[in-house]
Image: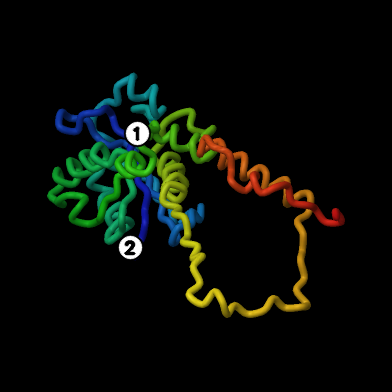
Amino acid sequence: MDRLITLDTETTGLDAANGDRIIEIGCVALDGRIVTHKPEDALQLYVNPERDVPDEAVEIHGITNEFLADKPTFVEVADRFLDFVRGATLVIHNAAFDTGFLDMELGRIGRGKLSDYCKIVDTVKLAKQLLPGRAVSLDSLCRYYEIDNSSRTFHGALLDAELLAEVYVALTRGQDVLEMHNPDADNLPAIPKNLVVVTATAEELAEHERILDIAEKKAKAAAAWRKLGTPTTEGEA
């Protein structure tokens, strides 16, 4: 399985074809499907765009011309970026935007396109397939999967890549198959006579109810489990 890396960029504007440039790249590598939060699994690069950052862009990401003045240009960080992502599957929210800018920057220095180095998954397209009819912005998906995005007062490439990693894991968490069919149902082994039944504690039942509440809220329907009756806690008859 390819290494999974979430990626986001911040830019001077919205149009790579008309002179807007990248000013931040954020990447988060997953360990399998686990977000490790280890420093070595993250990459954050600030980039001097060799042009001014408009005030309206600063209002979105908070990255100023003064902050970027002493930062390296893209050609100076390209190898570090490509070494981090080479051979991976990049998970990008609205991939066409970020890949458009990265392709522009790579093309300017004769390094081809991002797809020459990586496979790319667009989580906007994925979310529309898996959650039809729902809003699929990063903030909307964070709310849907109850992922804390309260620190997102400004857009930031590394912060958004971290949130996207959590969203991607939640978005692609499939239902395991539960096989109920037994081809030899008439010859099942006897239930052991010394079988011990351990009932749930009050705390465990409360947590179970909390999970059912979340499931009902998302499904907009009553959980079938609750139709089976109320289980007892330890010590109850």
| N-terminal label among 2 and 1 | 2
Query: Which image quadrant for residue 84?
Result: bottom left
The answer to whether residue 80 of the structure is visible from this angle is: yes
**CB atoms at circles 2 and 1 under 8 Å apart?**
no
What is the secondary structure assignment of the residue under circle 2?
Answer: loop
Residue drawn 50% across the image and 56% down it: 36
- Image quadrant holding the C terminus, namely bottom right
| Coloring basis for residues | rainbow
Q: Nearer the viewer, residue 176 or 39?
A: 176
Residue drawn 31% across the image and 56% down it: 89
Q: Nearer the viewer, residue 230 or 90?
A: 230
The answer to whether residue 25 of the structure is visible from this angle is: no
Numbered circle sitting on residue 169: none
Question: Eyeballing the image, is 73 above or below 18?
Answer: below
Query: Which image quadrant for residue 33?
Result: bottom left
Q: Which residue does the numbered mark 1 point to in the structure image?
A: 68
- Image quadrant holding the N terminus, namely bottom left
